[in-house]
Image: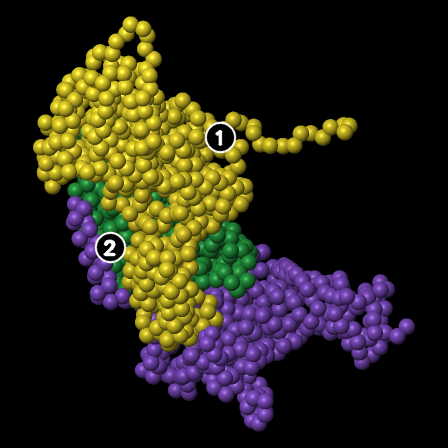
Chain colours: A purple, B green, C yellow
Amino acid sequence: MKKLLSCLLLLIFMAGILSGCWSRKELSELAIVLGAGIDRTPDGQVMLTLQLAKPSTITGGWGGGARGIEPSAWVVSGTGKTVLDAQKRLATRISRSIYWAHSAILVFGEEAARYGIRRYIDFFLRSPYSRETMWIMVTNGEAKDILEAYSEMENTSAQDIANLARSRTGYSVNLKDFTIMLANQGTNPIASRIDLIDYSINSGGLTRAKSVMQKGAILTGTAVFHDETLAGFLDESETQGLLWLRGETLKGIISVSSLTEPGKEMSINIIRGATEVQPQYDGESVWFDVKIVIEGDLWEQQSGEEIMERQVRKAIEEEMAGEVEDKVRLALEKVQGEYKVDILNFGESFHRKYPKVWPKLKDSWDEVFAGSGVNITVEAHLRRSGLETKRTSEKE
Amino acid sequence: MLEGGKISSRQAIFLMVSMVLPTAFLFMAAVIAHLAKQDGWISLLLAVLVALLIAWLVVSLSLRFPGQTIFQFVEVILGRWPGKVVAFLYIWWLIHVNAEILRQFGSFMVSAFMPETPIIVFEILVMVIAAYAVRNGLEVFTRANEILLPIILVMVFIINILLIPELNLKRLLPVYIDNGAVSIIKGAIIPSVWFGEIVVMAVLIPYLNKAKEAYRVAASATLITGSILIFSYVNSMALYGPEAADGWIFPSLNKVRMVNIANFLERLEALIMFVWVAGGMVKISIFYWAAVLGSAQWLELKDYKPLVLPVGVIILALSIMAHESILGLYTFLATSALPFWIVFQACIPLLLLIAAMLRGPRKTRH
Amino acid sequence: MRFIKFIRRGMSGRRKSDSGQQDNGSKNQKKENLTANQEPRNQDLSSDLQTNLRQIRAILSECSDVIYREFDFAQDERIKLALVYLDGMVDKTRVSDQIMHSLMLDAPLVEQGEEFTRTRVFAIIKKRLLPIQQIEETNNLDQVIDAVLAGDAVLLADGCACAVINDAKGWESRSIEESQTELVVRGPREAFVETLRVNTSLIRRKIKNPNLKIEAMKLGQITKTDIAIVYIKGIVSEQVVTEVKERLNRINIDSILETGYIEELVEDNPLSPFCTVLHTERPDKVAAQLLEGRVAILVDGTPYVLTVPLLFVEAIQSPEDYYERPMFSSAMRLLRWFSMIISLLAPSLYIAIITFHHEMLPTALLLSLAAQRETVPFPAFVETFMMEFVFEILREAGIRLPRQVGQAVSIVGALVIGQAAVQAGLVAAGTVILVALTGIASFTFCYYASTSIRLLRFPIMVLAGTLGLYGVICGVLAILVHLATLRSFGVPYLSPLAPLNTGGLKDVAVRMPWWTMLRRPRLVGMVNPQRVARGLKPAPPPARGKR
């Protein structure tokens, strides 16, 4: 019996080795995708753009690649009927297997986003290789251009953009959150907006002989969707207001004007905050009570006010609150007035509070939302002032 | 004696937990989410209650015939030939369940990790290890399980804890109103069938150190498994929300992919692969052992070792032939498995218990 | 108890089938040859000295180191005596000073009126004239020959059909040195030597208790090696002792040169890569094992002592753990567990991840590795396998290096294989680091376990190369199941982990302080479980009112 089992084992192992290991891929056989972009061509096809890493140019311990001159990534585009179809066309040009697991960003061109994004993201959700942690971005133009952009700080623009998204300066959405927002009836998806900006690079070493114009990527706000189609964009201030309304990532810097010295500003770093949204329904109309509480530190003061005095602090806090409320109202106007989409999760809050009423309203929720009133109360607290009480450079 | 091993109550609890947990941990969330959405944890609670009932049923039945497995006492209750028929049906059920488990196991590995590898490679390797364990007797895979299960539980725990930054418990609201009692009950059916696999205890009780503790063993195992699954389900729901969780086949896998602590602890799929492979192997071993032991007792052989290989081959073949694709498997598990399996898990034991009670006084001795 | 019954059944089963098989082997022929020479030997001595000497000479013919010293008794030159001994094995001064001096020169202390007759001479010699510390009387030629070959001096007298075996053993043997393979920082440094009596004395010095029993036997048809079975009565389980004796008695082999022979003939699972019998060079370790209720087997001629039963978790236990402070020892234990995992799995995990599961690496690391691997011509599996193989070659060569060549070879090893191969682009730097780490990690825990682990590394690497992480996990599971099947003299190999014994866990992953380890390991020391009294946690006395 032992002999039989050992023969069996031997056969299995031999079969495993001899017939070839099916899922084996050596590292040098991989075309590592760092970022992908999806555009819609005028004739309705999908244009898939891939930014592939070129490992030999990235520092591997024995010598660095020359940055600024030689790109450390290769960008290719291909078209097809579906994303996978486009990938298949690309495979005929790329000498290695396309490997999705490290793709950090997914950029959608404006055309693709306006057409409907659900059909494009299915591949990325279904494939076991691509990850749901990819950052979703929308650009005003073609995604291809973003991927071909240049990065000064990082090796490749995809890593650059991914780090920008990770630092959460704007509103960063990964594929998982995007999908949840898309699937949820009480809200609509949003994504970061990314654009190109020109800047000149001095290359050529010490002599600085050459000066090259490159395009870099920059986060410029948020893209607003109505279900799966792009409705419009919010700029940076509106995005900040949006963030406060959603109650997420309430950090940031706000600047208030000085009370005593006009023309001078103070900047306050918001450390933490909380937003509470209470939907109200009286049988006919819907409105929302939004309460925002923020805490901040005073980190920069152009004017010379005495923040040691309580009234001054109270006044500053009121200014802070006012500033926040302005931004929030800006965002709300855009969202309710112009785009008429609920991207603030108000629908979900309503659903949770009035679950029995929700089935009636959910199909036309965006209209209900556009017409509902929003009461905003902001409470601001000034907690700390850095290392100074008053400006130490002040003359007595 | 056919099987010389004896296991302690604690080992039996571990064994029973391992029996239900691995497949449930992986597949359960999707099936329930489809029906009960965010109230799936209520469904799980109901399922645990049903499971406790089934466990009580099975244990009461087994304790009437101390020292005999179900294959033996069914002959006592029903007479030799009807008993043999029922015993054969049970053997066949065990083999079928094992084939399903094996297929689930292979499907997960292929879908999630290595799509190019044929499914049979995974299945053969795990069957070989399970066959080795089963050949060496009950005590062997029990001991291996005693080491594996704590590791598995710790990993499940870690995965769920590491996700806390990403959770949003509000996604579990509103409770009950959205879905209604009907959906919740529908959602409870499939988990009950899975928990009901505890009927395998009818084969295991004769080999417990202290058979009287069998009630405690069954109850503890069910409660432990239930609480872990509820915890995991709540976690999945809070992470994805009711709508999105519906689409995934393996929400637990996707869950693990989302773990990202300080940009350092990420990409931890290896953890879930270990949970699945180790847990799957133990589960397959248990059913395999039960089937082999049952066959040996049915054929009245002195030793079950020669049967290990043939039964293994049957299970392997059946797992490949039974379904064409993972979707077929999924549909089977979500729909047809219920009426089919509940017969073996609850109906037949119930009938047997009634028959046994009618037949004569308690504790018929042999 | 039932575990041991279980294995005893297995034992008797084997014996039945063995009696057919083993005797048919080539050993049988040797045995027959031996018995052909031995049969006439089983006889008694004759009263005639010359006959005896002739017989002995006939048997020990062509043995040029046997000395036959014939002399006369000091008191009566009619009484002829002869001394037979092996040159080189006896202590010459003892033979000449104590035996021959007293018999040839000293005046006997005899009462008046007594006479030395031939019949009485031996009695008087034994009682009064042999100031040697150990003697034994015999009238069997067999025993005489065995005694001579064992290094004793045998005294024969004319007119007496008996002989006196004098213990005059004194051969050159190694002095007690530090153990070369089991080193500790804190703790006794003595190690066993090749002489059985010295080894037993080392154990006796640690356990001065009348219950420490040392039973003697001889094994090996030709070598007649002295074996000692040592245990502490009252702590050890009688069934284990009986089982050990039964298994030892079953051994029918021509030679026992080292405990390894006995180990292979006595262990429960001869086909397993894991040791179920511990071998050690340190007396303190053996003493500790005995105190836990185990049995030790000593063999003359080797410093390695066996102890049974053995548990898997002892592989990461070092005697130093019990001498150093518990916190430090616990940290070291955890380190050793971790090293064991590294030594088994590190190369396989490396192969698996960079060949199958690239998604598990962080992007930056992946790109860096990819850059490295661009230059290497071999697939990861082949490269790692090759490097591990080369490392094993280096390791094996290192053991047998003559000292003079040692320097040059280590330079070859380090520079050529490490540095030059990487620079030539044959292997990636990462692989070299990994292989070196794996090798070093395997030295942190017990050698007997590290050999098993080293061996098992290679099949798991093959599995990793074919099926990635799944293969690694399956390999680990297979090993685990195999470990679960092992028993060592009736005790499951994996206890106290499985079957779970929470009390025993105090000594597994960590080393709890002595005042907590109240009981002996359960399945081993179940006869007399308590070893430390309760309430021993030290605390300074309460502060007093006045000073």
Q: Is residue C480 above or below residue C111?
A: below
Q: What's the residue at 49%, 30% (across, down)?
A: C518
Give the residue drawn at x 24%, y 67%.
A20
Secondary structure beneath label 2? helix
CA gap, disc 1 and disc 2: 47 Å
Q: Is residue C115 left or right of residue C345?
A: left
* Three-letter residue code for mark 2: Ile
Report the side of A7 relative to B202 (left or right): left
Same chain for the residues at labels 1 and 2, yes or no?
Answer: no
- Image-quadrant location for residue A56: bottom left
User: What number is the disc on residue C518?
Assistant: 1
Where residue A385 sits, quadrant-wise, is bottom right
Residue holding disc 2? B124
Image height of C465 relative to A112, above or below: above
Chain label for disc 1: C
Residue B85 appears in which quarter of the rendering?
A: top left
Amino acid bearing label 1: Leu
Q: Is residue B15 visible?
A: no
Q: Position of residue B316 (x, y in %)?
A: 22, 53
Residue B320 in the image: state x and y as whole percent: 22, 57
In this rendered view, identify the residue nearer to me: B301 or C535: C535
